[in-house]
Amino acid sequence: MARKTLATPTQAPLLLGATLLLFIVIAGALFLNLMRLRDSFSWVQHTNDVLLAIAGIQRAVLEAETNERGYLLTGLESYSENYLHAREALGSRIDSLRALVGDNRSHVARVDELRQFVDMRTAQLGRVIELGPEHMREALEILEQARTDRLTERVETSLTALTRVEQALLTERMLQHDRESLAAALITACLLILAVASAAIAAFLLEHQRATARQQEADQRLQSLQAELMRVARLSTMGEMSSALAHELNQPLGAITNYVQGSRRLVEASSHPDKAKIGAALDKAAQQTLRAGAVIQRLRDFVGRGETDKTIESLRAIAEDALALASVVSRDRPVDIILALDPASDRVLVDKVQVQQVFLNLIRNAFEAMRDEPERRLKISSRATAGGMVEVMVADTGPGLDAQIAERMFQPFATTKPDGMGIGLSISQTIIQSHGGSISVSTPPEGGTVFGFTLPSAEVEPHLPSAVAVRAS
Ligand code: ADP
């Protein structure tokens, strides 16, 4: 039977390989993106450091100026000391700002210009501190000069220009960082989806392959069962037909013998000149008839002997195998199957293939009988009976038995089907009888047909080992 498959076993590794390759490519893209993300983050950090350094310089300029005024007004030493600290800090902060922007020429030029203004301003402040409150007049003159030179304003303008450029850079770099974060998130999501998808594909393919293998195994088993059953059925049919033929031929052969002997006596009593020759020929004819009878008798004996190969088998397993084989016939008309086999009388001593044949004959007949019935149900049940036997019942919801055939159902060639051979039930009877059992049919009042047959139970002899072949003839 042709089966549609999503991916053949050779396609499956290809598909998985392609998924893995895609996975590696996307993982590579994620790695590159993470590197860029790290770079953009360090650029943002760098710009923040530059902005902090500028703010530090602004603070230090303010502190130097505040302490200069404080000293001038109060003459307190602490102001002049603070002023000196602020001046030192200013120098080192400008150095570190220059180092931070060292890779940007225009920034370096701006910082150098700033340093120039700051140096000039601190020189003025220094002179004022040196003069102190004792020389207030000269100090105020320097302050006046400073106002004219507008050095503080220049320092502030220079710092503001630097801050503005850095803030613009910060905005740009943060945008870039956001874009890269988004890309990284998207790629990670893709990777996750791909990972889940490839895991799902792999699991699906694995399960699909397993299911296909299981199906193939089941198909092969069914095929070999069918082949074995067909072989047995052919042999049984031949045996049954020869037996029936022998039975049918025996009567005419007996009649021929009688006629030959009668003719022999008539010729004997006559005065025919060739009566001796005719008598001898009739004797030979009688001998040949007797020989033919003996041949037929031997054939019947041989068929009747029914050699079987008996082992301990599970009745349920035999019934299930036969149901699996028969279900091929009933695919277009499904039948409800009820298996009510008594587990306590499951083990039977039988020729497995032959008993399968009996089940198959009865199940097929039941399926065929129920074909046009609205309710199609088949019940197979069993129970232990006296004498160490198991009785099996196969009941259907078909139309019951045809009155014309009810009496001779188990005889060979009795059939009501246009293409039937009428051999199935007679073979079944021969098989059951060769097992020491019996088969019968009945029609219960609620309708349908029930076939019942008995088989030797193996449960009564628990000491018998399983699957031990016992030759019985
Ligand atoms: P075939 O099936 O070839 O006719 P069988 O020996 O198996 O030969 O059956 C003989 C006849 O017995 C069938 O033709 C049918 O009329 C009758 N028969 C067998 N089983 C059933 C059944 N379950 N219900 C009704 N009739 C049946």
Image (cartoon, rainbow, N blue to C red):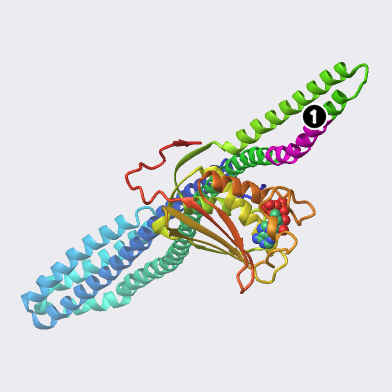
Residue placed farthest to the left in the image?
A: 77
Any part of residue 122 in sight: yes
- Percent coordinates x, y for residue 308 in the rendering: 52, 38
Left or right: where does residue 451 sit relative to residue 287? left
Expressed as whole percent of the image width and height from the top left, the position of residue 23 reads 48, 50
Q: Main secondary structure of the magenta part?
A: helix
Q: In which quarter of the image is residue 140?
A: bottom left
Left or right of 334? Residue 459 is: left
Quadrant of the rendered image containing residue 344? bottom left
In-front residue for pair 161/435: 435
In-image side of 119 versus 368 (left or right): left
For the residue labelled by badge 1, is the local secondary structure a helix, a strand or a loop? helix
> Residue drawn 65% across and 51% down?
425
Question: With respect to residue 268, does 69 lie above or below?
Answer: below
Q: Give the range drawn in magenta.
A: 242-262
Residue linked to disc 1: 261
| Above/below status of 307 relative to 96 | above
Tell whether 321 sits left or right of 174. Answer: right
Magenta stretch holds residue 255 = yes
Number of on-image labels: 1
Which residue occupies the extreme bottom position in the image? 73
Q: What residue type is labelled 1?
A: Gln
Q: Nearer the viewer, residue 249 or 207?
A: 249
Q: For the point 29% across and 60% down, which residue is it?
A: 97
Report crowding for label 1: few under 14, some 14 to 19, many 20 or more residues within 10 A (C-alpha).
Answer: some
Residue 111 place in picture, x, y as percent: 34, 61
- Magenta-span inclusion, residue 207: no
Quick check: is the Cβ at mark 1 less than 8 Å away from ligand 1? no
Above or below, 297 relative to 159: above
> Residue 290: x percent and y percent?
72, 28
Q: Can residue 327 be seen in this view?
A: no
Of 7 and 419, which appears nearest the observer?
419
